Each structure stands twice: as C-alpha cells, then as structure tokens.
Image (tube, grey):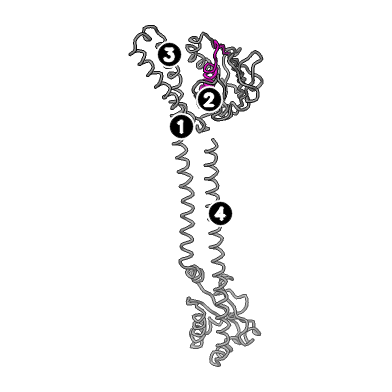
Amino acid sequence: MKKERFQLLLLILSLMSLMALVGIQVAWTVRAARMQENQFNHSVRMAINSATDNISENKFLCEGINNCLFREGHGSCAMIMENMAEWDSLESVIRKDLEYYGIDLDFEFDIAKAGDSSKNTGQNEVYLSRNLEHMLERSGYYLSIRFPGRRDFIIAQMGNVFIVSIILLLIVTLSSILIYRYYRRERQLSSNTIDLVNNMTHAFKTPLTNIALAASMIKKSKEVRSNKSLSSYAGIIQAEHRKLKQRVDKLLDTSFYETDPSSLYEPVNIIAVAREVMKSFEVQAEEMNGQIKLETKEKELFILGNQDLLYIALSNIIDNSLKYNTNSPDININISKSENKIIIVIKDNGPGVPEEVLDKIFNRYYRLDSEQNNSEGLGLGLYQVKNIAERMKGKVQASSADEGGLIIIIELPCIDHE
C-alpha cells in the first residue's frame, strides 16, 4: 500500500513538474514574442525618424507634401499623390530606411489627418511620425506606416526557437497523457496479478495444513513405522510440505498488502467466513484433542472488505493458536455487534505472550525468543492480520487472558446489507 501511494505521489509530482515546464515554456514563448515585438516597434520608429529627416532634406518631396497639406477637402495625401512621382519617391525613401534597420516588409504609408482611419486600421499596427519639420504637426497631419504582414514577420524573426518551443510543448503534453495512461494500465495489470496470487495462496493454505496433518497421522501408524520404505515416504511428504509452506507464506507476504483497494469494497458476511475458517481447522484441533468454538447471536454480519483477505487474517490467528499450544487447544471465537462496529474476539488457552512484548507481536518478522517458540514460521501471520484489518478501516489489538492464553480483538465497521 505504501509502495502504491509512493508511486502515485511520484507520478503526480512528475505530471505537475511537466505542467510547470509547459507553463514556463508558454510564458517564455509569450515573453520572447513580446520582446521581438518591442524590438520591431523600436526599429520601425528609428526608421521613421530617419525617413522624416531624409524627406525634410529633399526640397522636391517637401514641395509635393506642402501642396497636399494645403489642399482643402481631403484627409489623406495618398488619395491625391498616389499616382504622382513624389509619392513613389516618398515610398523609396521610407523603404530604404526600413531596410537599413532590418525590416524587409511590404508596407502601406500615408500622410493623413490625426484620427483618420480610412486606410489605417488596427492601432497597434500603425506607426506615426510627429517631427516632419513641424510642418505636419502644425497642420494636424502625420506620417503613418502600416505593415499588413507584421505578425508573420515577428514570428519569422523568432525562427527555429519558436517552432522548437511549440514542438516541445506538444511533446511534453502528449508524454504526460501517455504516462498517465500507461500508469493506469500497469496498475490494473499489477492488481490482477496480485489478486491471482492471493487467491492461489489462499487456496493452498488449507490443503497444505491437511496434508501436514495426514502425513503426521500416517507416520504415527504402526504399519508405517514398521516399514522403513513407508516411513521414509512419509518423511519425504513432511519435508516437502515444509518447503512448500515456506514458499506459499513468502509469496503471500510479498503480495497480499498490495491488493487493489477497489477490490476491498464489497459486502462480506463475516459469520460465514468465520465458520469456513473454523471448519478448515477442525480436524487439526481434534487430532490435538482440542476444539474450536464459534459463539455469536447473529446469523449474518456484513462488512465492506475482501473475503479472501479476511479468511487469511482469521486463519493466521487460529493457526498460531494451534501451532504454539502445548496443551489440548481450546479456541473460542466470539463475534458480536456494538453500535456500528463488529467485534471479533479470538481467545485460546496457549502459553500466551508476555505483557512487555504484546505491542510488538504485530510487527513484521517479529517472533518470540523462547523455548516454546519451536515452530516454523516467518513472523508474518499477525503482521498480515494487522495490515488486513487496517485496510478494511478497522483495527486489531492483543491482550493476555487472566487464566492464561492470548486474546486477539479485531474491530471492523459494520454495514447494513439486504
């Protein structure tokens, strides 16, 4: 579960980082465009200033403009001078100065009254000059230049940098989407694999217990003990059982707590699961001259959980009670409902656990260091119980019985089920 959360957190941080990079790239691209636009505007104004100086020094052009300015009933010199040689000369002077400042664009120009918009549309695309020998200023006319291809020119000036930026933005965005899709697909595949492993280990545990019990009973038989071959075969069965059980326990340990959380939320009748667990251990308890009892006033009690994991949790507790009990085992399972909680109390008559280590028995790989603890195990049983209970939004605790033995108490949220 922690590994899954870490992976999800890592994915979220990666996606957030990619989104931040996209934002930075967009901001940089916009800033670069604005800087290029400011540079373009500055170059145009420098070119206009140069052009007005050059026009002012040309008497031929000044006379033509002067005749235009003092002609009544018009607001634009372009309408009067468009077919005149002076107008072509004006265009030539302006073009030369624009090219000098690196602006090789088609343009439209006019000498028109302030506020006239007959030809110049788009305030941000019109550039005005106010210092044409004060002649234009006194008459209320201005030299204006407009560039129809201004935006394309600015983008072209950014060149490969702009194109690469757009491509990188698209790649990063597409990569983020693909990473998330692959993560979802991988989690689904992992969840299906883990569910399969959990179901297999669950299916193996009870047969393995019964095989061990049957092998033990066979080996105690007089006929087997008197026959060396049969006794050897029974020993092989027991040895191979131990090896297989260790592998199943290890496999269960590496997979059960990674079960997909969505598979936990299904109604489970805890009474039915407890009866199934009790039935699977009855033969083993009887072989040890013991018993397992289930006490409850309820016929059905439901929780939101996973039936297989709940079976594993209860089986681990019963298995420990039988494994570490040197007496005739007497195991009592009591299930009751208190308000909105289901309380499962499992009590045995075994050697119990010292008070000072009760809070450690649910730790991973923890085993008691005592002469009584001579059974095989990895110290995973109660650790699994705790993790399963917590994943089902419950809790587990242990205490010592007054007359000896261990008490395991599991609390799980109860639900109504029709």
Q: Quadrant of the N terminus?
A: top right
Q: CA distance from mark 2 to mark 1?
A: 18 Å
User: Is there CB contact under 8 Å for labels 2 and 3?
Assistant: no
Residue at the spot of label 4: 20
Residue at the spot of label 1: 194
User: Is there CB contact under 8 Å for labels 1 and 4?
Assistant: no
Amino acid marked by disc 2: Gly
Q: Which residues are magenta?
A: 309-331
**Residue 295 occupies which quadrant of the picture?**
top right
Q: For the residue carrying disc 4, how many other residues have a C-alpha within 10 Å: few (<14), some (14-19), or many (20+)?
A: few
Instruction: Identify the element where label 3 is drawn.
Output: helix
Q: Which badge, 2 or 3, comes first in the chain's sequence?
A: 3
**Residue 314 occupies which quadrant of the picture?**
top right
Kindly report which numbered mark, 4 or 3, lies closer to the viewer in this rendering: 3
Residue at the spot of label 3: 216
Q: CA distance from mark 1 to mark 4?
A: 35 Å
Kindly report which numbered mark, 2 or 4, lies closer to the viewer in this rendering: 2
Amino acid marked by disc 4: Ala
The total of numbered circles placed on residues is 4
> Which mark, by number, is residue 381?
2
Amino acid marked by disc 1: Ile
Residue 128 in the image: x percent, y percent? 59, 78
